[in-house]
Image (spheres, grey):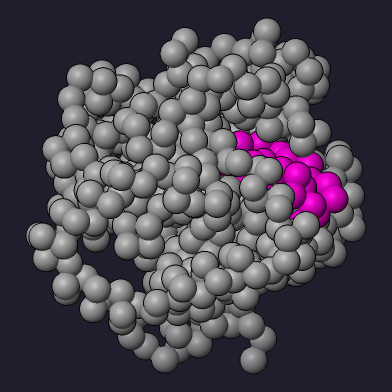
Amino acid sequence: MKTLQQPTLRSGARQAVRCSRNVQRVFATAAHADIRREAMLRVPLEKAHTFNAKFVPFADIQTGTMSGESYSLDDVVYRSRDGGLLDVHHDMKALAQYGPEYWRALFDARIGTTAWPFGSGVWSKKEWVLPGLSDDDIVSMFEGNSNLFWAERFGKEALGMTDLWVKQCGNSHTGSFKDLGMTVLVSQVNRIRKLKPGSITAVGCASTGDTSAALSAYCAAAGIPSIVFLPADKISLAQLVQPIANGALVLSIDTDFDGCMRLIKQVTAETPIYLANSMNSLRLEGQKTAAIEILQQFDWQVPDWVIIPGGNLGNIYAFYKGFKMCKDLGLVDRIPRLVCAQAQNANPLYQAFHKANGSMANIKEGYAAVKAKTTFASAIQIGDPVSIDRAIMALQDANGIVEEASEEELMDAAARADRTGMFNCPHTGVALAALLKLRERNVIGPNDRTVVVSTAHGLKFAQSKVAYHSQSVPGMTCQFANPPVQVKEDLGAVMDAIKTKFSL
Ligand SMILES: *Cc1c(COP(=O)(O)O)cnc(C)c1O
């Protein structure tokens, strides 16, 4: 096992703080850029860096046998030769040269630093994310490092739990965890555009709202054009206005997410428009850092359960990958059990799980895509998830389970938890409702350390909260609604209103 020496030096050299980076930028005239591009082309990535990563078929990861098919991360490629998904595969031997103490100490030392780019929760794990990327190419908003909320009151009062936590991934630049993946994808695109000018004209995605917001923000920061395909009238107003504000080309298409996805795949297959959907495995490399952060936030103790709302099912695999890397490199000795929480109105994985009598084994046989119905959890209104195979592998290996939540259950759970200080989006509501059910059946025990992943900020979904609290959702009791009291400008009327709740 090597000592701390080598990467410390490397990272030390890179600890050029932001100001000197800006100075470098000033001098990066066109001529300088050409010289740098030349240098990048001449030094093969594998030789220039101790650590490296490449695309391999996801099937290789699944079966644990390397077929030999692989692609450079600088290639524009989304699918393996046989049409399967790809996965970013790290040289684990190179990473394992450094012991677990080294990695834990390195990651911990970078929390809160201003040194570019390590103050980002994603890039603080750079060696495990995109080790070959130059710091100059990184497009970051210092995403990640989101807080882990101790849900003390909700745990105690609603669930009889002592050790419940909510990972607030929505406390982020564009208000969802999608920032974690997008910083990685847009940084790599930034590199490719410099390496091969003209190869990528714009970056495009189909989105249920949050992906397009993250894509357009990161692209705007880097000066890269972006195009977003949105299902008309199926996303929140706050989500819609984000890419508009960031200057993306916004196409509001008269279909659902799955329809947008089919179109963007065709467009990106035929044009120099780069595909930013989570079929693109680069994003999952950023998203996996949220799992590593959770371990860090527990001083490298492993929680018993992590509950994740699932739509396209990339994020559940990303969490699994983060936990698994920590285990494989010895930072922890096990991985948590994972729960995938789906909205009942878009629940293909839950249906298969149910058909298999609650077992993850052989679940694929009973699996079928569905036509997703409207749900308040609009970011997971997906009937034909791209990452189904990734999710199945993650859940099988993490002794995972799948749970679902009806519209009433998810809205009630979100509102009930809001009463204890949170401000949950409907997707977080799905995860909280799943937790309520699993506690009821005692699948999750009262003292199990449990983390609910909150995927977006509640403010992005204010419309649905307004509908709930004004009790205007058809067919829903809205039992935790807290509508404002209309009062005339009159002291007596104000006192009467106060006395309905407090004895003075
Ligand atoms: C994207 C998204 C999800 C679902 O993540 P998948 O990787 O598609 O399963 C959940 N919640 C929110 C708020 C999202 O934006």
Considering only vertical position in the picture, is 8 above or below 228?
below
Observer-nearest of 150 and 183: 183
Q: Can residue 456 be spotted in the picture?
A: no
User: Bounds of the magenta span?
Assistant: 315-340
Residue 260, image x and y in percent? 30, 26
Is residue 322 in the magenta section? yes
Is residue 289 in the magenta section? no
Rendered residue at 89%/43% (across/down): 442
Residue 475, image x and y in percent? 51, 36
- Residue 73 placement: quadrant: top left
Rendered residue at 39%/26% (across/down): 78
- Residue 221 placement: quadrant: bottom left
Q: Can residue 111 be spotted in the picture?
A: yes
Rendered residue at 52%/45% (across/down): 52
Considering only vertical position in the picture, is 107 above or below 329?
below
Rendered residue at 70%/23% (across/down): 64
Q: Quadrant of the N terminus?
A: bottom right
Considering only vertical position in the picture, is 80 above or below 210?
above
Q: How many marks?
A: 0
Q: Give the residue at the far top of this rendering.
A: 365
Q: Quadrant of the C terminus?
A: bottom right
Observer-nearest of 337 and 195: 195
Left/right of residue 173 with respect to residue 57 in the rendered view: left
Residue 7, image x and y in percent? 59, 65
Observer-nearest of 249 and 232: 249
Left/right of residue 501 with respect to residue 464 in the rendered view: right
Observer-nearest of 51 and 250: 51
Residue 3, image x and y in percent? 73, 66
